[in-house]
Image: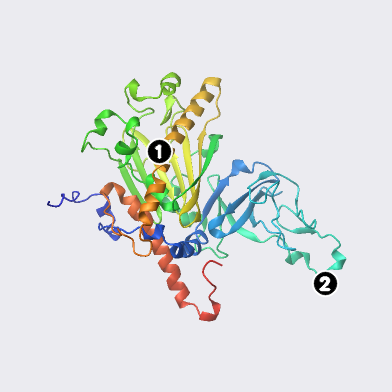
Amino acid sequence: MGKWPKPPEGSWTEHYPELGTGPISFRDSISPEFYELEREAVFKRAWLNVGRVEDVPRVGSYLTKDIAAARASVIVVRGKDEQIRGFYNICRHRGNKLVWNDFPNEEVSGTCRQFTCKYHGWRYGLSGELTFVQQAGEFFDLDPSRHGLKPVNCDVWNGFIFINFDPEPRWSLREFLGPMITALDDYPFELMTERYEFEAHNNSNWKIFADAFQEYYHVPALHSQQVPSAVRRPNATFECGHFQIDGPHRLVSTAGTRRWLLPPEHMYPVERATRSGLVGPWRTPETHFSAGLNPGGIEPWGITNFQIFPNLEILIYHGWYLLYRYWPTSYNTHKFEAYTAFHPARTVRERIEHEVASVVLKEFALQDAGMLGGTQEALEYGLDEPIVDEFPLSDQEILVRHLHKVVVDWVEQYRAERRAEPRSERKPVGV
């Protein structure tokens, strides 16, 4: 058989020649050794989103976040000066985990005036300072000013709280996000405070699940019950409207309306009854203007998915948004966090519309998640020498190509920096 024709000149991928157009490898998703390097090169150097300012709404509000890829737990707290700070969740006396409730491996949130260690009663103020030591006279030249909580770099962009484990980050948060993301400076995320959250522990590398939301090439096959019948015909066109790349970050926009234009027989009965579903409530507040919301100028615009490296996605719809985070827990497992965010419901009907949209979206995500185990298992066949190690990508899969290239590039840069270090200064990978 002959080759299929290549995409036309000027295709999306060819706008970014540094990506190439050849097959790619997924070894970065099946190697324990690569994962250890990725933890150091990516998750200990990039800015990571851990919440929003609404999660710590008043002085003394705090949350904890356990990040397996960094082998660390952090406390995020709003201080008396209203500044939001991050600290390692470690008591400076004997290393006990400082903030937890019934089970130390569970994340918690709340409000307090100070943090008190359960073990020996050391206390810390909201700015991390050591304020009380039980029987301080028993210690030898103890200087309280040197034993406050160890800080983690913390900054906020448009209400989203980010941390960075690098003691000296290579970029400020704003520099890291770059112009494509900060074009959303004026988008009013703070108005959408009614949230519906869910979490899943998945049997795949984190990038394998992220890949599922970077292209819609899979939609007619995998989500066949949620798309018009015309799209399911062989070779029917189903494409995104706009792809864009800026540094390590990615963006994809689709055309659409406030509801899929499906015949009633292809909707769940609850969607027909509530007039809400996969793309949210059919009636929502008018889309807020933002210069960055629809950079491709798609009409009618439907969704823009902002994929912030490494593990955050914000999908903005008409008057509401959806957020995903992928937290690696090993080379072939990860924790998936998601929530939908709406304007607070004014009536019982609006509340039901929001809940229905959230449940239908969860079902859609479960269909994607259902592929993960099979993909990971097959990629790991012949782990040291994969049976298949070259995978062709279509033009619509440009963002899949980009994510894996960026991760490999960050790891290669980290390796080069380690090679340049004097041997005496190197620390073992994974420490």
Toward the viewer: 149 or 66? Answer: 66
> Label 1: how many residues lie within 10 Å, few (<14), some (14-19) or many (20+)?
few
Q: Residue at x 34, y 30 (%)?
A: 225
Q: Nearer the viewer, residue 66 or 334?
A: 334
Which residue is at a point 28% across and 58% down the rendered structure image?
Answer: 390
What residue sits 39% from the left and 59% below the top?
A: 406
Residue carrying label 1 = 367
Whether residue 297 can be seen here: no
Please tell me how many numbered marks the rendered image carries.
2
SS category of the residue bearing label 2: loop
Residue 307 on image: x %, y %: 42, 48
In x, y percent, where is residue 423?
A: 51, 80
Q: Residue 233, percent across and down?
A: 22, 33
Q: Is residue 89 left or right of residue 405?
A: right
Q: Amino acid at mark 2?
A: Phe
User: In which quarter of the view is residue 152 placed?
Assistant: bottom right
Give me the C-alpha separation between circle 2 and circle 1.
Answer: 60 Å
Q: Is residue 165 left or right of residue 213?
A: right
> Which residue in the protein does label 2 denote?
140
Q: Position of residue 258 (x, y in %)?
A: 39, 28
Q: Is residue 227 visible?
A: yes
Q: Amino acid at mark 1?
A: Gln
User: Which numbered disc, 2 or 1, marks the residue that appears first in the sequence?
Assistant: 2
User: Quadrant where the C terminus lies?
Assistant: bottom right
Crowd around label 2: few <14 · some 14–19 · many ≥20 (10 Å): few
Q: Residue furthest left?
A: 2
Residue 296 falls in image quadrant? top left
Q: Dividing the picture into quarters, in which one does residue 306 lie?
A: top left
Eyeballing the image, is 31 above or below 398?
below
Q: Is residue 214 left or right of residue 39?
A: left
Q: Are marks 2 and 1 in contact (CB under 8 Å)?
A: no
